[in-house]
Image: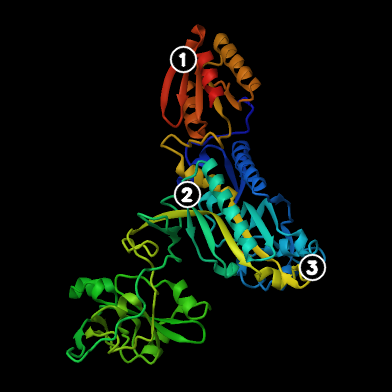
Amino acid sequence: MRQSNLFLTTLREAPAEAETISHQLLLRAGYIRQLAAGVYTYMPLGRRVLRKLERIVREEMDGAGAQEVLMPALQPAELWKESERYEVYGKELMKLQDRHEREFVLGPTHEEVVTALVRGEISSYRRLPLTVYQIQSKFRDERRPRSGLLRGREFLMKDAYSFDTGWEGLDLAYEQMYQAYGRIFERCGLKYRAVQANAGAIGGKGQNHEFMALSEIGEDTVAVCTSCDYAANLEQAEVRGKSVTPKRDFSGNAVPVKFHTPNQKTIQQLEQESGIKPQEIIKTLIYTNGNTVFAVLVRGDHEVNELKVQKYMGGGEITLAEYELVQQAAGVESGYVGPAGLSLTVLVDQAVAGMAEGITGAGEKDYHLRGVIPGRDFPLENVGDFRNAAAGDACPECGSGQLEFHQGIEVGHVFKLGTVYSEKLGANFLDTAGRSQPMVMGCYGIGISRLLSSVAEQNHDDEGLIWPSSIAPFAVHILLMSAKDEAQREAAEALYIQLTSFGIETLLDDRDERAGVKFKDAGLIGIPVALVVGKGSAEGKLEYMDRRAGTKEVIDIEEAVARVRGI
Ligand code: 9G3
C-alpha cells in the first residue's frame, strides 16, 4: 500500500474526552474514528488489525471443532420474553419496532437466538455435541461509554455456544474452549490471566472463568496467588478461614463501656479523632433485599462482598439501606449502629467472629462501645465469608501463598450455562432411552474490539503504538526520505515491489513530506519494522529500525530483505 493513497490522517493531539492511552493513540494514529458516543468506524489501519485478530480467533475456534455461523443482530422481542430476560437489562437492551410496530431488540448477545435455532434443527442425541460460533456486532446501550473500543455501545464479539447431552460433555467443550482461549491470547501477544468469576445475571449454576488483560486501567480487580495458580475476580475470591468459632467462656470479661465519639461516624474519623485502629472496629452495615432488612458485620479494615452476602441470603438483589430505613431498623443513624441488641438477622464475617472483643456503634448518636464480645453481646448464628479478599490474605487454595491484586480488562468470558436456556426455550433432545432431555449448554465470548484496545494498552511507548507482528496492520513500513530524489525513489519502489512480491505486507511512505513528519507518523502507527531509504541507498544501504527494541542500524538492502523475510 502506498501511503500517499492510504485513507489515513494522523493527529497531533487526541480529543480531550480520550482518557485512556489506547483511546488516544488509536484516534491519533488514525485507526478509529468516533461516529457517536461508544460507536466507532474502523479506518483502514484499524480494520487490518481487526481482521488479523478475527483470523486468529477463527483458526482457533475451527481448530477446537466449532462451526462458524452468522446470526442476525435484529432479534424478535418474543425470544427475550420467552427467556424472561426482556425486562432484566433495562435501558442497556436496545429495543426498536419494525414498520408493523412489531418489537425487536438489537442483540447484545445470542443465547436466545442460538437456542431457538438449535431447537428447530436438533432433536436426537446422535446430532450432539455441537459448538457453533460467530463474529458479529453486539449492541449494549452503556450508560457511560468510554475509553474508545474498551467500552463501546456497538462492538465486535466472537460468541460461541456449545450443546451437549450431559454435564460431562459440557466439561469437555468448556475445557476445549478454555485451552483455545489461551492459544488465542498468546498469539495476540496479550499479557492475561484466566480467573474464576461469577456468572452474574446470565444465570447458570456452572463454573465460569474470565480472561483478564492485565492493565492498570482495567475496571476489574483480580486476586492472584504468589505461589500457586489460584486467580479469581475479586467478587469471587474466597477468604480462607474457619466459619465455626469455638465456644468461649465470657465469665471473666467486663461489660461493654460506652464512650463519647461526637461526629465520628466513619472508620477514618474514629481513627483520626479517637486513635482507634480499623482492625479493632466491628462495622455494622444494614442491608435490605426487598423484603428482609438485615445487618452484616465486617472488621473495620475489611469491605463487605455483596455478592457473597447476596448468595447467602438466597440470591436476590441486595442494597445498602437508606438513611431512613437504618434509623427505623436500628434506632440510630448508620454511623452509630452496633450489633448489640439489634432485632435483625445479623451476618457475621468469620474475621469478626474470631475477634476477642471489638469497638462498635453504641446504638446512640455520638457514642460507641468498647469491649463488645462476639457471641456474648451479639449472636453468632450466621457466621461466614462475607468480605472481599484483601491483598496479603492467605491464598484460599494453597494456604501458603499470599493474594496480590492486579487490575484487569475482561477480554473473554466462558460459562457453563447448564440447561437454563434450553429449558426456557425448549431445546430438548431424545436420549438413548428415547427420553426427552434439555440440552446442556455453554457459552464463550471474546470482545474482539476490546481485545484490540487491550493489546494497544499493553503495547505502546511515548512515540505511539507498537503492534505485535502477529496482528500489525503491515509487517514493514518503508520510509522514503526524499520523494524528489529520483535515485532514492527508485530504490524505495524496487524494495517495495520486491517485498510485496514475497507476500510481505508493506506500507510505503511515498508522501512528499519532510523526514521528521514521516518518522513521527511511523512512531505513532507502530508497524514493527521501518526501513529508511535515504542517501545511503546510492551505496545500496538503508536504515533498519526495530520499533519495539528502538534500535536503528545501517545495513545492506539485501540483508534487510532477508531479515524481514525471516520474521
Ligand atoms: C443483555 C444486555 C447486556 C448483557 C447481557 C444481556 C452481558 C448478557 C452476559 C453475556 C454472557 C455471554 C455469550 C458470549 C459470552 C458472554 N451483558 N450478558 O447476557 F440483554 Cl443489554 O453476554 N454471552
Q: Earlier in the sequence, mark 3 or mark 2?
A: 3
Dot 2 amino acid type:
Tyr
Quarter containing ligand 1? Answer: bottom right
Q: Is residue 289 visible?
A: yes
Q: CA distance from mark 2 to mark 1?
A: 37 Å
Question: Measuring 29% from the left and 86% from the top, which residue is drawn there?
Answer: 247
Q: Disc 1 designates what residue?
A: 555
Q: Does residue 344 sit above or below 404 in this rendering?
A: below
Q: CA distance from mark 3 to mark 1?
A: 68 Å
Mark 2 surroundings within 10 Å by alpha-carbon count, few (fewer than 14), some (14 through 19), many (20 or more): many
Mark drawn on residue 269:
none
Q: Earlier in the sequence, mark 3 or mark 1?
A: 3
Dot 3 amino acid type:
Glu
Is 312 placed left or right of 405 in the picture?
A: right
Q: Nearer the viewer, residue 434 or 133?
A: 434
Q: Earlier in the sequence, mark 2 or mark 1?
A: 2
Dot 1 amino acid type:
Ile
Q: Disc 3 designates what residue?
A: 101
Is the C-beta separation of discs 3 and 1 under 8 Å?
Answer: no
Q: Nearer the viewer, residue 539 or 99?
A: 539
Is 465 placed left or right of 506 in the picture?
A: left
Q: Disc 2 designates what residue?
A: 192
Q: CA distance from mark 3 to mark 2?
A: 45 Å
Q: Position of residue 350 (x, y in %)?
A: 34, 76
Mark 1 surroundings within 10 Å by alpha-carbon count, few (fewer than 14), some (14 through 19), many (20 or more): some
Label 2: element kind: strand
Question: Measuring 20% from the left and 74% from the top, which residue is drawn there?
Answer: 276
Q: Residue furthest top?
A: 539
* Labels in figure, total: 3
Label 3: element kind: loop
Q: Nearer the viewer, mark 3 or mark 1?
A: 1
Q: Nearer the viewer, mark 3 or mark 2?
A: 2
